[in-house]
Image (tube, rainbow, N blue to C red):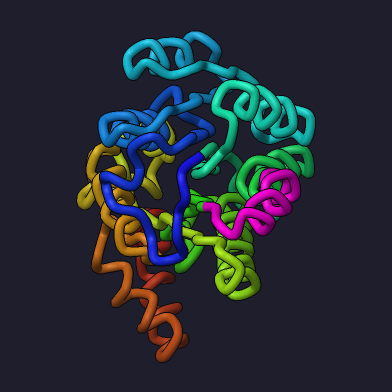
């Protein structure tokens, strides 16, 4: 068992840590799994795509535990298998996410799936992990949210709303348990060159494509945050400025977002 302090862990500190990465078969999750394994972590790779999880696990010398992290059963089975393999879970990267939907007309089942994967998956994981972490006085949770959770994502209300929920839950955990040894990192990138971005349509092209980065860049910024204990992980530093404008000049920010919406609709 590795002791992880609330001040964060260095690259050397990650060495030997038991790590779980959900959605680890591709995109940001795959990059995180590879980066933490390169830093010496023992990694369990989870993905809905069993072949993708197995491929990444094989590359990094980890264990593949395929399954649906968007269900209570899937999370419980993953954590049970990971504990059996690792002994202890020191760092849990709750990374799996889903897009889909548009506005209020989005069917309830699409909204529900977004809640299950983008928000409730984090709740379900901590329900199982938190008691042990608090007893040990150490544990690290990484929630991959999105800049959409700090700002918004035009074109997809379900994604925006559930990612806001993910950020809010991460904040609540950090505020409630930091003094008891829990470290929380909330990862909020803008566009990342993944399948999700490729499928985001016109809104993704207008808002995200121009500044999109590689998944490996997200993993590098997360590695630095793990080292210094930083809560908010911003692979696109400019998001900090957008977030400040949203908070302090909300009407101005909303007018700017509406102009972007008009561009998406081809009106500008």
Residue at position x 32%, y 73% in the image = 240
Front residue of 164 and 89: 89
- The question of residue 215 being in magenta is answered with no
Q: Is residue 106 in view from this perspective?
A: no
Residue 183 at what x, y percent from top left? Answer: 50, 61
Depth check, front residue: 64 or 18 = 18
Q: Quadrant of residue 41?
A: top left
- The residue under the point 72% across, 25% down is 77
Relative vertical location of residue 188 with respect to residue 33 in this rendering, above or below: below
Q: Judge from the rendering whether residue 29 lies leftward or rightward of residue 137; answer left or right.
A: left
Q: State the count of labels.
A: 0
Query: Is 116 positioned to the left or the right of 214 in the image?
Result: right
Residue under the point 29% across and 77% down: 241
Horizontally, residue 166 falls left or right of residue 80, namely: left
Image location (x, y in percent) of residue 14: 35, 43
Q: How far across and down, in percent of the image, does residue 253 sit?
A: 40, 80
Q: Nearer the viewer, residue 178 or 225?
A: 178
Q: Is residue 134 magenta?
A: yes
Whether residue 2 is visible, yes or no, is: yes
Magenta residues span: 123-139
Question: x and y percent of residue 133 in the render?
Answer: 63, 52
Note whether 147 is above or below 193 in the view shown.
Answer: below
Q: Principal SS element in the magenta part? A: helix
Which residue lies at the image location 26% right of the left edge and 59% below the top edge? Answer: 236
**The C terminus - image quarter:** bottom left
**Res. 179 image quadrant:** bottom right
Foreground of the two, 175 or 90: 90
């Amino acid at each position: 068992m590795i002791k992880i302090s609330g001040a964060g862990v260095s690259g050397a500190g990650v060495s030997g840590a038991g790590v779980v990465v959900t959605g680890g078969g591709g995109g940001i999750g795959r990059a995180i799994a590879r980066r933490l394994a390169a830093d010496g972590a023992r990694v369990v790779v989870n993905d809905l795509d069993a072949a993708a999880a197995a491929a990444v696990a094989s590359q990094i010398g980890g264990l593949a535990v395929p399954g649906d992290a968007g269900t209570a059963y899937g999370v419980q089975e993953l954590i049970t298998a990971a504990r059996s393999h690792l002994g202890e879970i020191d760092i849990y990267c709750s990374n799996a996410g889903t897009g889909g939907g548009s506005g209020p007309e989005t069917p309830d089942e699409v909204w529900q799936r977004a809640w299950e994967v983008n928000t409730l998956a984090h709740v379900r994981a901590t329900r199982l992990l938190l008691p042990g972490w608090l007893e040990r006085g150490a544990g690290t949770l990484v929630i991959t949210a999105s800049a959409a959770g700090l700002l918004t994502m035009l074109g997809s209300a379900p994604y925006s709303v559930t990612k806001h929920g993910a950020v809010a839950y991460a904040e609540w955990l950090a505020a409630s348990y930091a003094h008891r040894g829990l470290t929380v990192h909330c990862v909020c990138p803008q566009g990342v060159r993944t399948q999700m971005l490729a499928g985001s349509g016109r809104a993704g092209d207008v808002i995200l494509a121009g500044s999109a980065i590689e998944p490996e860049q997200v993993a590098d910024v997360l590695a630095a945050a793990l080292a210094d204990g930083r809560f908010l992980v911003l692979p696109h530093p400019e998001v900090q400025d957008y977030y400040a404008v949203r908070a302090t000049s909300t009407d101005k920010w909303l007018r700017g977002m509406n102009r972007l919406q008009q561009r998406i609709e081809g009106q500008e």
